[in-house]
Image: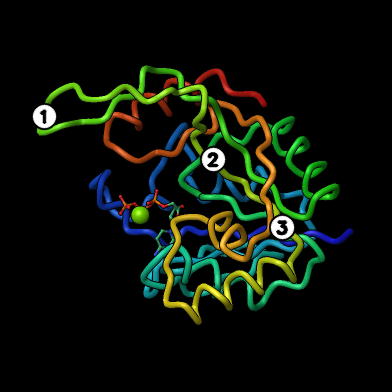
Amino acid sequence: MSLSVLLPAAGLGERLGRGPKAFLEVGGKTLLEHALSAFAWAGEVLVALPPGYPQPPRSGVRFVAGGPTRQQSVWNMLREATGDVVLVHDVARPFVVREAVERLLKAVSETGAATLAIPVPDTLVEEQSGSYGAVIPRERYRLVQTPQGFRRELLLEAHREAIRLGQDYSDDAQAVLALGYPVALVEGDRRMFKLTYPEDLDLAEGLARTWNC
Ligand code: CTP
Ligand code: MG
């Protein structure tokens, strides 16, 4: 089974407010460098960068221009990928737990489509005009992470259908599910959090000090 790793890195990091997160340093390395070293074992690696940003010199990695949305960035990589299976991983998640990736790959080889996800740790409540509203049974919900993995032909079909319908999904599992194809949920890891807000930088710097996964 050949594998292509697609690394969407073309976002502008607007909520974090420090420019594109791919070039942000944590633990002395950019988030892009974290992702490239986590997946250095993969046969084929593609990265979507924000258009106009310089491509770092890296052998064995193909850089493509990202699009205005995550889905379009993934599409720009997917149409050039050649593996039987593709793994899509947000560069904004610099801490990649090897065992979680192995669990995911096993599920993808068995089912054709899987994503990492974690339970909701806190009480989940609907906000009603700034007040505490209806409590949602958190046991029924999961927080979705990446990597997500799919048979390449399946993800291609899902993206083509999303484009045809004019849909723009925030992750690839949604596009596959919209085809009616089930996506397995595989136990993720809270350390694989996505750097999204400024305070996430402090969490990431702290974790980087002891990281050896
Ligand atoms: N991404 C991408 N192309 C886009 C938008 C997002 O490749 N047009 C990537 C980001 O680089 C990131 C992942 O998708 O690795 C998840 O996106 P997110 O956390 O939303 O990052 P940004 O879009 O950069 O942040 P923001 O939404 O705050 O601007
Ligand atoms: Mg975004």
What's the residue at 49%, 34% (across, down)? 143
Left or right position of 201 against 193: left
Q: Which residue is mark 1?
A: 130
Q: Which residue is mark 3?
A: 150
Locate ligand 2 by image quadrant. bottom left
> Label 3 vs label 2: CA separation?
14 Å
Closest to the observer, 131 or 71:
131
Using a 10 Å C-alpha cutoff, classify the residue at mark 3 as few (fewer than 14 neighbours), some (14 to 19) or many (20 or more): many
Using a 10 Å C-alpha cutoff, classify the residue at mark 2 as few (fewer than 14 neighbours), some (14 to 19) or many (20 or more): many
The spot of residue 72 in percent (x, y) is 47, 71
Q: Which residue is mark 2?
A: 145
- Mark 2, secondary structure of its residue: strand
Left or right position of 119 against 13: right
Which three-letter amino acid code belongs to the residue tagged 1?
Answer: Gly
What's the residue at 48%, 33% (across, down)? 193
- Mark 3, secondary structure of its residue: strand
Disc 3 or 2, which lies upstream in sequence? 2
The answer to which quarter of the image holds residue 125 is top left
